[in-house]
Amino acid sequence: MTAALKVGIAGLGTVGAALIAQVARQREALAARCGRAIEIVAVCARAKGKDRGVDLKKMKWFADPVALARAGDIDVFVELIGGAGDPAKGAIEAALASGKSVVTANKALLAKHGVKLAALAEKHHVALNFEAAVGGAIPIVKTLREGLAGNSFERIYGILNGTCNCILTQMEQDKMPFAECLKEAQRLGYAEADPSFDIEGHDTAQKLAILASLAFGTKADQSAIYVEGISSITPADLLAAEELGYRVKLLGVAVKTDKGIEQRVHPTMVRKDSAIAQVMGVTNAVTVDAAGINPLTLIGPGAGGAATASAVLSDIGDIARGVRTSPFGRPSALLKNVRKAPMQRHEGGYYIRLLARDKPGTAATIATRLAEQEISLESIVQRHPAHVDTDAKAGSVPVILITYATTEDAVRKALAAVGRDRVISGTPQVIRIEKN
Ligand code: HSE
């Protein structure tokens, strides 16, 4: 049998500990499937004495991840430190430059420096694998890079942040406001240390940048993504969506348009009977529209020690078997620059919730302003203020509009005109509808 694959792990949080436990549990199956044993021979973390619930006695201890990355007695460097800069970046560069394959779960680093790291891996003929960076245990990276390598992609969209999906689920099911549901998600330990990273959509954007690169050959670039978070969503929106046959999800969407690849993250109305609308709680899902097979949806646990370790271990298994592909599915020199989508040109249906003055002529004024922008309405619903939990003031009624496909520019112009007409109070709520 071929010699064992020797692995060094930098970062011993919940994922690192789960990985060590899974390698021990799966020892024989892994050796059989990969044709060689997988041995964790070295680890690196900040606190040496801490009890992590796993046996580290036989592993060499490193205090410096770069020293571990360069160590002569490892074949694979597993980076579980996180963060877009050093020490994770420096350690990965050191490993690749010294001819070691790298496995990482670091979405932030890949969304910023992925192209350069891929080029370095190619130069040294080693692997840079990152299944765990997107969607936890869902094998979406391999699905796009290998399983669907012969397909032409039209659109990829997904629920890529468990914290946001958990918050939206609780807001819908328990009719609780956003702030309370966020507190609950933090209490359960789902949210990132800085929850704004989750709720403002940046975590989703980093993951989307990676998926878009794999599907469309763009350079992974978080700054090219339009991002809007979920903090403005209210239980009233979720109730109205439900009544109109939709659910609201924070989606990352990458879509081929005649103007290029549009990448965006925002709260999105999806049809209640679609696969993605069924995904509740912290679960993640990705739907792939590719010619001839659309839609194909993968659903599963998107975060947590065991789910992430599962993805890391499958990447290590590929290296043990000698499987190596270009990190983003094609040589990094072929990856294309991508521009940020000008959202005013975005085309699609819209949900609009207005607090309208309860006076004769208000509906006619709103309809006129929409007609001026050639916006056609699919439905218009006026609710008694008590029907939904809104911030309605006395004399105001919630009016909910669903438009047919139009442009964002037209919607913004129509709403600005309605605002000038003084027939509404507060800021209109606007949610894009994704056809699915
Ligand atoms: N904060 C992330 C989430 C963790 O909620 O999905 C996984 O990337």
Image (spheres, rainbow, N blue to C red):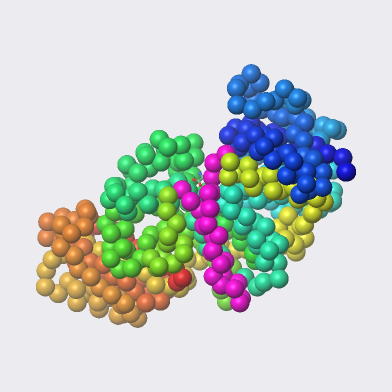
Is residue 248 something that shows in the picture? yes
Vertical placement of residue 228 versus 36, above or below: below
The foreground one among 280 and 267 is 280
Residue for point 79% across, 54% down: 324
Find residue 334 and report its horizontal and vertical position in percent.
75, 64
Vertical placement of residue 105 versus 53, above or below: below
- In this rendering, position of residue 370 left or right of residue 26: left
Residue for point 31% across, 52% down: 173
- In this rendering, position of residue 77 left or right of residue 382: right
Of the 4 image quadrants, the one containing the N terminus is top right
- In this rendering, position of residue 428 left or right of residue 27: left
Stretch of the chain drawn in magenta: 282-305
Is residue 64 something that shows in the picture? no
Residue for point 46% across, 62% down: 276
The foreground one among 154 and 310 is 310
Residue for point 57% across, 76% down: 258
Find residue 104 and report its horizontal and vertical position in percent.
68, 44
Q: Quadrant location of residue 417? A: bottom left
Vertical placement of residue 365 versus 97, above or below: below
The foreground one among 44 and 323 is 323
Magenta stretch: includes residue 293:
yes
Magenta stretch: includes residue 184:
no
Find residue 262 and report its horizontal and vertical position in percent.
55, 66
Find residue 320 and report its horizontal and vertical position in percent.
79, 46
- In this rendering, position of residue 18 left or right of residue 119: left
Q: Quadrant location of residue 93? A: top right
Residue at the outermost top position: 49
All told, the count of numbered labels is: 0
